[in-house]
Amino acid sequence: TAAGIPDYIGQEARFGARNYAPVPVVVDRALDCLVWDVEGREYIDMMSAYSAVSHGHLHPRLVAAAQRQLARVAVTSRAYYGTTLGPFLEKLSEVTGFERALPMNTGAEAVETAIKCARRWGHRVKGIVDGRQQILVARGNFHGRTSTIIGFSSEAGYRVGFGPFADGFQHFDFGDMESIKAAATADTCAVLIEPIQGEAGVLLPPPGFFLQLRVWCTENNVLLIDDEVQAGLGRTGKWFAFEHEGIRPDALILGKALGGGLLPVSAFVADAAVMDVFTPNSHGSTFGGNALAAAVALEGLRVLEDEKLVERSAELGAYLIARLREVQAEVRPLIRDVRGRGLWVGVDIDPACTTARDLVERLAAAGVLSKETHDTVIRFAPPLTISHELVDRAVETFRRVAHESHR
Ligand code: PMP
């Protein structure tokens, strides 16, 4: 190219699969909440890799933990014991309040682990005939991209041409107890649900819904499995989003931020009565719980605690939402809704005005990274380390771009 910079975009397009549609920003380096492209332009990261970079980019304590571990051992598989996995699992038990965890790598793998666990629990503990176990899932869900998981997605784009799909999933409407009761049968072993539907557009549950769901699951001996891959670890202003609902699920799925923004680390988390349906050789992963991942994830949990990032998410999130609502009032009817919890915000755009993607691209050109979900929602989910000053800068940029679209 003109400046002597290799054509990275062309290279990805030529040699990569075409399953993504990236915003045309070539990221070269990043630190905390800032990102720089190959030409040295600065951006505020208001997206943090879909909430995977909650600690900020390259947090010095996480980099140091990785470097310390890289001087010892990185990967041995679960064929042996190690010196970092035990401490990580004990810490995870302390922060989640659950007895056991099964570490995996990606969110989708941890969801698959949850599905397998729920079904075996349904068979072994509840006595459902094997092969008949049913799991209830919400319309509009997002739990990952494996064949099993997309089989119960409501998104045509995720599914068309990818069948045949696995049986054993029944849909209900998110937030609607009656539709859960209607979908359930004697073979129902679990409800798998996001506490806030992220990919669907940061959709909050109606007040009291999770409380009712908790009571119903207990009464019917059905596991309540809470997918907090995106919501967990402080994103919503509490350690876990279920705390907003005053409930405790039977199992928890974590991912994204669990890897401290450095590595893929996920986990399926439950008490022994549920987890112990897994017996030796019934499930596993070569990289899951590897020494390097465990060292980084452990330090990540300590950083969340030491830097009070959960409290910070609550405070800065309320501030971000209030500031975005000021912009909303100025540019009616461009923005239909500003909603969220903690530093996890959806800005709902009136499709009669413009698309979310158009605003996302214009925001990127103006130095703010965000992400559209569907045609109408822009998602802001910055690192939990963000300052008032950077929120102000991002909102001012959004204000300018919104006013341009409003004219
Ligand atoms: N569950 C939820 C709630 C998610 O938001 C995501 C990712 N957006 C996943 C699961 C899948 O995670 P991964 O992309 O790491 O497989």
Image (tube, grey):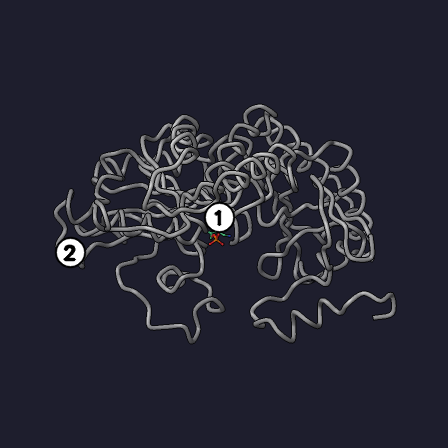
Kind of residue at disc 1: Gln
> How many residues crowd mark 2 within 10 Å: few (<14), some (14–19), many (20+)?
few
Relative to 169, say whether 47 is above or below. above
Q: Residue furthest front?
A: 71
Q: Residue at x 45, y 54 (%)?
A: 142
Residue 378 at x, y = what percent? 64, 52
Label 1 C-beta lies within 8 Å of the nearest ligand 1 atom: no
Of 346 and 2, which appears nearest the observer?
2
Residue 393 at x, y = what percent? 79, 40
* Relative to 187, 202 lies left or right: right
- The quadrant holding residue 211 is top left
Of 334 and 78, which appears nearest the observer?
78
Q: Earlier in the sequence, mark 1 or mark 2?
A: 2
Judged from the image, the secondary structure of the residue bearing numbered disc 2 is loop
Relative to 22, say whether 332 is above or below. above
Q: Residue at x 22, y 46 (%)?
A: 280
Q: Residue at x 54, y 25 (%)?
A: 305
Q: Residue at x 73, y 37 (%)?
A: 323
Kind of residue at disc 2: Asp
| Residue under label 1 | 197
Judged from the image, the secondary structure of the residue bearing numbered disc 1 is loop
Q: Residue furthest right?
A: 2
How far separated are the C-alphas under marks 1 and 2?
Answer: 30 Å
Image quarter where the N terminus lies is bottom right
Disc number for residue 130: 2
